[in-house]
Amino acid sequence: MAANAYVKRLAAVRALMRKKKLDALIIPSSDPHLGEYVPDHWRVIRWLTGFTGSAGNVVITRNFAGLWTDSRYFIQAEEQLAGSGFELVRLKVPHTPEHIDWLKERARRGWKVGVDSRLISVVILKLLVSSLKASGARLDLRADLITPLWKERPELPVDNAFELDKSFTGLTRLEKLERVREVMRGMKVDYQLLASTDDIMWLLNLRGNDVKYCPLLLSYAVVSHNQVIFFADEEKIPHAVKASLDRDGVVLLPYDAVSSVLSHLEEGSVILLSPPATPAALFRSVSRGVNIIEDLSIPTRMKAVKNDTELKNLEKVMVDDGVVLTRFFHWLEKAVGREEITELSAAAKIDEMRSAQAGCTGPSFSTIAAYNEHAALPHYVPDRKTDARLQKKGIFLLDSGGQYFGGTTDITRTVALGKPDTQMRREFTLALKGTIDLAMARFPRGTKGYQLDILARKPLWDNYMNYGHGTGHGVGSFLNVHEGPQTIGSGATGDMKTSIEPGIVISDEPAFYRTGKYGFRTENLLVCRAEKESEFGIFLSFETVTLCYIDNELIDTSLLDDSELKWLNGYHERVYELLHRHLEPEMQSWLRIKTMPLSRGY
């Protein structure tokens, strides 16, 4: 779209701002469920500015319009915002509300700052209130200026929900509800408000098709000790599913009835809600006589710890996924230089191959297929403007994943398409050492993710190198590919108080990026296991469950210590043993070569 179209849209927004006497307008990149991925209906920033990244905040005043985003999107945002009337404002610290700090410095007494409170969390609401208080500025929390202007706005999805069988979930809906209610009783909580759709899907053993890459149904829920009020569009709930919900004490009400119910809760009752995951509009709907406890939701904590059924299903899924990846990289190696392959066609190829697998419903996120300098951009996604042709030289990074009924996958592999030089092998191996060292970690129960981060970064830090993103994120079970509260990294990307517990699934993805040249990342998924109890307590370790070879062309074994080399050879032997029987003879031979034991000085 021509840049002047965005200039016109900005002018139209400013005209409405003048009409409503707004001095500033905040537009977040979220929907009323505050999830990572949002339906096209809520991609307001893309419509208004042309920026297609998944994270950002826009602030518009009478003489300034800016987009705040993090380093993942700096280059992309510069290109997409050119001529739009919007300026790029680079976040100094990722995932932080620096746009509010900017407003705090400029707001004046009498100013009116508008925001749609459906699209901001309770945390952001409180920060806005406290930040603007000193200046005397006022907040308008019903400032939806986009709906009147966006004439061809996409409709919300209308696909049906479906139930997930106990053979995948491991627990029935009633079993999960009883566990949640037991915690509620211990907390002396009468109600729990759930606004995160992944929490609701997990609790009710439902899945939907409302959000790209995530099997979610847009919905809310209020859990009490004798029923669940489930707020969803009735036309999305098939009769059989509705009857099943009804048998388990789940009452279906219209999607937009949640505020009314919250406003009529009995005085003196206690409701639990999660401030980062609850829209400010719902928080403000809770009747004044109700006591609010602010904490992470109970399902958020419970679903992070996978049960035995979920973990066994994930093991099978990893074999299926590993077979697909082996087929893909075998094809890639043979085809590069012989046929036209670009980043986009490579991404389409792995998505098509994975989606053809039994039990796979599609990708778990937008595939990152990055060649050479594009691999230096951690969250690069190719498009028609940037699509690069792969050649029989250089570096190719593929970060991809699938949604299977038995689990969610996320894996990154970097391969050499030609002969890598010494510097490339050194830098790849230093990042790989971090992947291996974290995978080999042994630690006492109660250890937090940020305490393990040093294991992944030390090989790079020892060489004055680093990477700018988190080391590990939780992964759902046929749910969101990024699932909290567990994390390995800074508190900005997860909950600092959450321990790494047996049963959690978390990614292991140290990396190194050389801007303008190439990037390296080796990402596996880990399952935390209880290993041994000693006089000093219970000790935990990780099991690497992802199954795909690591390109030995990029490995400088002289940089690996004995334990790292032993881990790598053991991992490759396991990859071969679990995958080769599902492959044709030619691919078996090829994979055997890729997984042969390495020795010092390879």
Image (tube, rainbow, N blue to C red):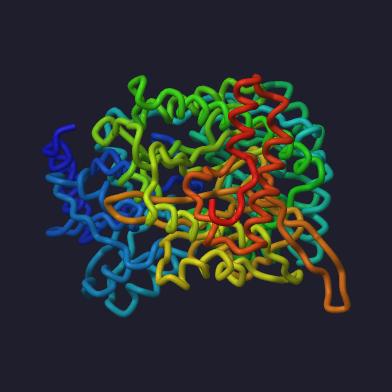
Nearest to the observer: residue 298 or residue 509? 509
Question: Whole-percent x and y of residue 261?
Answer: 61, 48
Camera-side residue: 268 or 4?
4
Q: How many marks?
A: 0
Tell me: residue 593, above or below residue 492. above
For image coordinates 22% across by 58% down, the residue present is 22
Q: Can residue 254 be seen by looking at this rendering?
A: no
Front one among 479 and 456: 456
Q: Residue at x 40, y 72 (%)?
A: 464
Direction from residue 353 to residue 302 in the image, left or right: right
**Residue 296 percent coordinates (x, y):** 63, 61
Residue 524, compared with residue 188, is above or below; it is above
From where the camera sits, is residue 79 visible?
Answer: yes
Closer to the camera in the image, 46 or 470: 470
Q: Position of residue 12 (x, y in %)?
A: 16, 43
Q: Write down the quadrant of residue 434 in the picture.
A: bottom right
- Rendered view: 49 above or below 503: above
Where residue 599 appears, as percent x and y from the top left, is: 61, 52
Q: Quadrant of residue 137?
A: bottom left
Q: Residue drawn 36% across and 21% down?
A: 338
Who's the residue at 30% across and 64% down the image? 99
- Quadrant of the image containing the N terminus: top left
